[in-house]
Amino acid sequence: MAVVAPAVLLAQVPWWASALMLVALPLLVWGWRPAQLAQMELHEQRLTLIGRHWQELESPRRVLRAGPWMAIQTPKGWLHLFDDQAPREQLQPFYQWLWTNRKSN
C-alpha cells in the first residue's frame, strides 16, 4: 500500500508538474546537510550545544552512539558529532553527563 499510493498520486499529476518535481528533488537533496556541533559547554545541570543553532539541554531525549559517531536528539532536531571533531578524552565528561541525565522510560 505504501508503494502503490505515491504511484497512484503521481499518475494523476500533470506531466509538467512531474518534470518540475524530478528537477527539484535532486536540488533539495544536494543542499541538505546534517546539523553538526561546533562547540559544547557543560554546566552544572545543563548542556549547551552550539552549532547552526544554540540549544540548552537539561536532559537528553535520545542519544545514539556507534563507535566514533554520536547523534543527540534535541527539541530542534538531531545533532551529529563525528570523531574528527574532538578526541574521546575531551568528550568523556559529555558522555558521562548524557548517561547520568538520560530519561528513563
Image: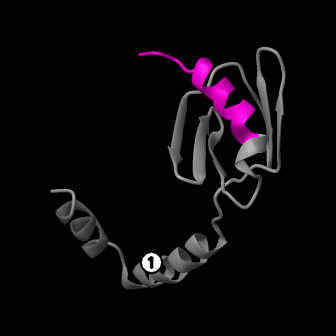
Residue depicted at x 79% and y 43%: 53
Instruction: Work out which residue is located at the far front of the displayed protein and give it.
Output: 89
Residue depicted at x 84% and y 21%: 43
Residue depicted at x 52% and y 83%: 23
Residue type at mark 1?
A: Ala
The magenta segment is: 91-105
**Residue 80 is inside the magenta segment:** no
Residue 73 in the image, given as x and y percentages of width and height: 58, 37
Name the image quarter holding the N terminus: bottom left
Residue depicted at x 72% and y 61%: 84
Check disc 1 and report the residue beneath it.
17
Q: Quadrant of residue 50?
A: top right
- In the image shown, does 44 or 105 lie closer to the viewer? 44
- Figure check: 102 above or below 3: above
Q: Quadrant of residue 77?
A: top right
Magenta stretch, main secondary structure, is helix
Residue 60 in the image, given as x and y percentages of width and height: 61, 26
Residue 69 in the image, given as x and y percentages of width and height: 58, 53
Judge the density around disc 1: few (<14), some (14-19), many (≥20) Cα neighbours within 10 Å: few
